[in-house]
Amino acid sequence: MDWFISLLDGHVTSFVQLSKLFREQYIANRAPPPISYDLFDVRQYQGESMEKFLNRFGVHVVRLNLKDETMMVHAFRKGIVSGPFSESLIRNCPRTFGEIRRQAVAHIVAEGQVNEKRTCVVPTRPRAPGRPQPLRVHKATTKKKTPAQQQPYQPRKPQTRGRARENVPPRHDFMVELKDLLAIPNIAERLNIPAKTDKKLGPNKNAWCEFHQAFGHPIRNCLVLGHQLDE
């Protein structure tokens, strides 16, 4: 309005002249016409979902009225944020924007299912039926013990680990092997030779015991022979 008032009286003689002066005055405020290369400026924002970016990109495609599929494919691949979907586009190499749209829709559906799975609450395992066991609470006693209740300190006896000592095979320092002792008559006649069996007499299936004549343990670990030699 200020521009119209500032015009001199008698300066404008026709509407065509007024329109020309108006365009010259406000042509700088006119938005430049869109061009096809503006599509490369459409970028996915940080944290923006693929669904929102796909819709925003599609609006620019319709506004520019593009028909060049190659340009749309390159612009979309350049605009998306690096991630699993961009890597899939590099591997699959779609040729049209329609193929990109189909792959994007499948990615959006899979992404929604993954997010739903992450937010799903994992149920806890139900307790076995039965009466609940009461918790045992140890009450600390502040009452001092009488001299009669106090006991002298006794050190703890050392405990053996693994098998009991009576099950450990005795160790002997003979000049010959135990299997050679079985061939000595004075020793063989005092031993109680066990009956033969087809069972495995130990965890080692390939070890042979000449005393039992069976597999399962070597003769140096034979408990029965060791105890008989001790006697």
Image: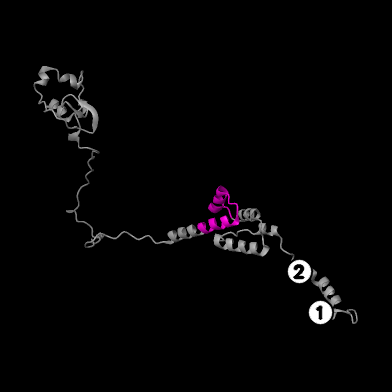
Image quarter where the C terminus lies is top left
Residue lying at 31% horizontally and 59% vertically, measured from the top left? 125
Give the percent coordinates (x, y) of residue 13: 89, 80
Residue lying at 73% horizontally and 64% vertically, measured from the top left? 33
Crowd band around label 1 with a 10 angstrom C-alpha radius: few (<14), some (14–19), many (20+): few
Above/below status of 130 relative to 223: below
What SS does tag 1 mark? helix
Give the percent coordinates (x, y) of residue 52: 57, 63
The disc placed on residue 2 is 1
Residue lying at 83% horizontally and 79% vertically, measured from the top left? 4
Q: CA distance from mark 2 to mark 1?
A: 19 Å
The disc placed on residue 30 is 2
Q: What kind of residue is marked 1?
A: Asp
Asked which quadrant contains residue 127, the reply is bottom left
What is the chief secondary structure element of the magenta stretch? helix
Report the front residue among 16 and 116: 16
User: In this rendering, would 120 be left or right of 11?
Assistant: left
Give the magenta part as a residue range.
81-107
Was residue 100 drawn as part of the magenta stretch in this picture?
A: yes
Residue lying at 23% horizontally and 58% vertically, measured from the top left? 144
